[in-house]
């Protein structure tokens, strides 16, 4: 029996799952850790809290199963979140700056007005935005005393969360990342597969800070027994959304997954084609296996499941997220009321950071049920807007594989299929992200022979076929567009 340990270090919690060699889950544990909001728009994590949560969840699994028999470890992680630490002591110079953090908005604005936007798109496939690591590194170099000098002297290491965990797990012997995480730093040239000197100069980042970049399935280093309780090789790393695509066996060009957690993230596999979006979607590395790069087109909706949380915790009109399904089923599709959950601005394809949310079209007859149902509909409409942008870029999926906590809601998935006019597939295992990390480790460990074996293991649990008439769909989408137009600040 060989075990695979998968670690999913997410934005709000850390998880560990142990699988057997048939990829059946044997043990799992999860722990939340605190979010730190030092100022409006700033979001930080305590690196020690991240590390302790990862140690805690892995040790919990190891306590259950024993410390022997581990063939490999896979890591998946919240992407872009930025840390810098001392190569000597391993201590971070500052809290992690989380992907959601907007403190570098002015710097991005300045670089954009200097005309740097195009070179960033051309080389990284990303938009010049605070979301990605580069300006977060620049901020740490600029604002934390002594960091610039120590970085130039080669005393410090930068990493996204995968790199930090790998460093800690290997007792500081390994400073490395994988190509998917590297592709989210805004310093990595996704065409040459190397850190890019022009970008390093643009963001004023010394190369000495940066990790080595490996394939997603690679021998990253051996984890020390005293770090997380087992001595085993780290054999797989991928950023969370890419890991979800792998967990969904999305290895073929055209395959598309949409993950519905706090936000919604869509990635379409575009094969060896690094397709540049005309609609402000991102070009990213979907995977790199045996040196072969697969690209992806990515779009995200900032607020998906968190809109449901807002119904529960903000408006307090439901007691639990799962209630929304019965409410919507009973209410039926709502036409006049629109909830636009632009709590943090609108993402792709609008990119309107200043837009804010609204409930529109209320009449005396509108109540809780209409607002709840319209909220679920809004998440489907926003997915539609992303897919429409992808389609305009020449990528129109025929099927979408969904995962994440929200896909428990079957009313939502049927409405999604209707609004997209695309078949929606729900897998038997909706925990695609952590599963993807296990697949990567399994591939390198030889527990899984090839990606086609993963495709063979993927199982559909339920299919949602579109059934709505074209007229009805267009009418509903027109209503949604009109609602979005009313919250936008840039038109
Ligand atoms: P994350 O990994 O981002 O923390 P999860 O994948 O665990 O998120 O999904 C949790 C989200 O899904 C929550 O925001 C919750 O509101 C939403 N959710 C969970 N169950 C349902 C449901 N039955 N209907 C609608 N939303 C749901």
Image (cartoon, rainbow, N blue to C red):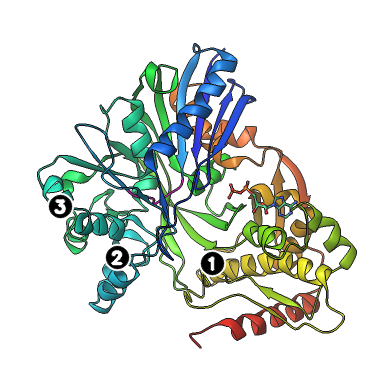
What's the magenta region?
Answer: 78-82
What is the CA distance from the residue labelled 3 to the residue labelled 2? 23 Å
What is the CA distance from the residue labelled 3 to the residue labelled 1? 40 Å
The residue to which callout 3 is attached is: 148
Q: Is residue 374 visible?
A: yes
What is the CA distance from the residue labelled 1 to the residue labelled 2? 20 Å
State the image coordinates of residue 185 (x, y, percent, origin top left). 33, 53
State the image coordinates of residue 415 (x, y, percent, origin top left). 77, 63
- Say few, some or many: other residues with alpha carbon within 10 Å of mark 2 (under 14 / 14 to 19 / 20 or more): many
Tell which tag, 3 or 1, sits nearer the viewer: 3
Q: Is residue 361 left or right of residue 121?
A: right
Indicate yes or no whether the magenta region holds residue 53. Answer: no
Find out whether the residues at labels 3 and 1 contact each other: C-beta distance under 8 Å: no
Q: Secondary structure at mark 2?
A: helix
Indicate yes or no whether the magenta region holds residue 81. Answer: yes
At x 29% / y 47%, what residue is drawn? 94
Tell which tag, 1 or 2, sits nearer the viewer: 2
Q: Is mark 2 within 8 Å of ligand 1?
A: no
The residue to which callout 2 is attached is: 120
Q: Secondary structure at mark 3?
A: helix
* Quadrant housing residue 465: bottom right
Mark 3 vs 2, N-terminal side: 2
Quarter of the image where the N terminus is located: top right
Q: Secondary structure at mark 1?
A: helix
Residue 390 is tagged as: 1
At x 65% / y 54%, what residue is drawn? 400
């Amino acid at each position: 029996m060989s075990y695979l340990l998968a670690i999913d270090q997410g934005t709000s919690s850390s998880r560990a799952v142990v699988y057997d060699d048939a990829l059946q889950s044997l043990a799992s544990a999860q722990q939340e850790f605190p979010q730190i909001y030092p100022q409006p728009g700033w979001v930080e994590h305590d690196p020690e809290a991240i590390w302790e949560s990862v140690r805690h969840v892995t040790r919990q699994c190891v306590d259950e199963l024993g410390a022997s028999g581990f063939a490999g470890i896979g890591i998946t992680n919240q992407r872009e979140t930025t840390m810098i630490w001392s190569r000597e002591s391993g201590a971070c110079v500052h809290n992690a700056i989380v992907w959601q953090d907007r403190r570098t908005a002015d710097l991005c604005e300045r670089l954009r007005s200097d005309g740097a936007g195009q070179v960033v798109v051309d080389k990284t496939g990303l938009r010049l935005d605070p979301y990605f690591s580069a300006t977060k590194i620049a901020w740490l170099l600029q604002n934390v005393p002594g960091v610039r000098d120590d970085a130039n002297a080669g005393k410090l290491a930068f990493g996204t969360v995968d790199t930090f965990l790998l460093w800690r797990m290997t007792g500081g012997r390994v400073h490395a990342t994988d190509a998917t995480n590297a592709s989210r730093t805004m310093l990595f040239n996704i065409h040459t597969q190397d850190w890019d000197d022009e970008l390093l100069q643009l963001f004023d980042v010394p190369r000495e800070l940066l990790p080595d970049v490996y394939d997603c399935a690679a021998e990253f280093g051996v984890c020390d027994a005293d770090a997380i309780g087992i001595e085993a090789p780290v054999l797989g790393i991928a950023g969370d959304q890419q890991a979800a695509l792998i967990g969904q066996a999305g290895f073929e060009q055209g395959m598309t997954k949409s993950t519905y957690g706090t936000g919604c993230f869509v990635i379409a596999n575009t094969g060896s084609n690094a397709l540049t979006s005309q609609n402000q979607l991102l070009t990213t590395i979907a995977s790199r296996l045996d040196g072969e790069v697969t690209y992806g087109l990515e779009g995200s909706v900032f607020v998906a499941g968190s809109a449901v949380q807002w119904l529960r915790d903000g408006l307090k009109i439901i007691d639990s997220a799962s209630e929304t399904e019965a409410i919507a089923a009973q209410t039926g599709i709502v036409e006049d009321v629109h909830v636009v959950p632009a709590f943090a601005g609108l993402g792709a394809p609008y990119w309107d950071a200043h837009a804010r949310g609204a409930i529109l079209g209320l009449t005396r007859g509108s109540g809780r049920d209409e607002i709840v149902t319209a909220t679920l509909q809004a998440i489907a409409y926003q997915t539609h807007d992303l897919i429409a942008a992808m389609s305009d870029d020449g990528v129109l999926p025929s099927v979408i594989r969904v995962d994440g906590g929200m896909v428990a809601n079957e009313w939502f998935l049927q409405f999604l299929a209707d609004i997209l006019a695309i078949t929606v597939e729900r897998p038997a295992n909706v925990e695609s992200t952590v599963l993807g990390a296990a697949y990567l480790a399994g591939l390198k460990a030889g527990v899984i022979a090839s990606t086609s074996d993963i495709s063979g293991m993927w199982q559909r649990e339920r299919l949602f076929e579109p059934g709505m008439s074209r007229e009805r769909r267009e009418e509903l989408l027109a209503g949604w567009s009109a609602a979005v137009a009313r919250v936008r600040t840039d038109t």
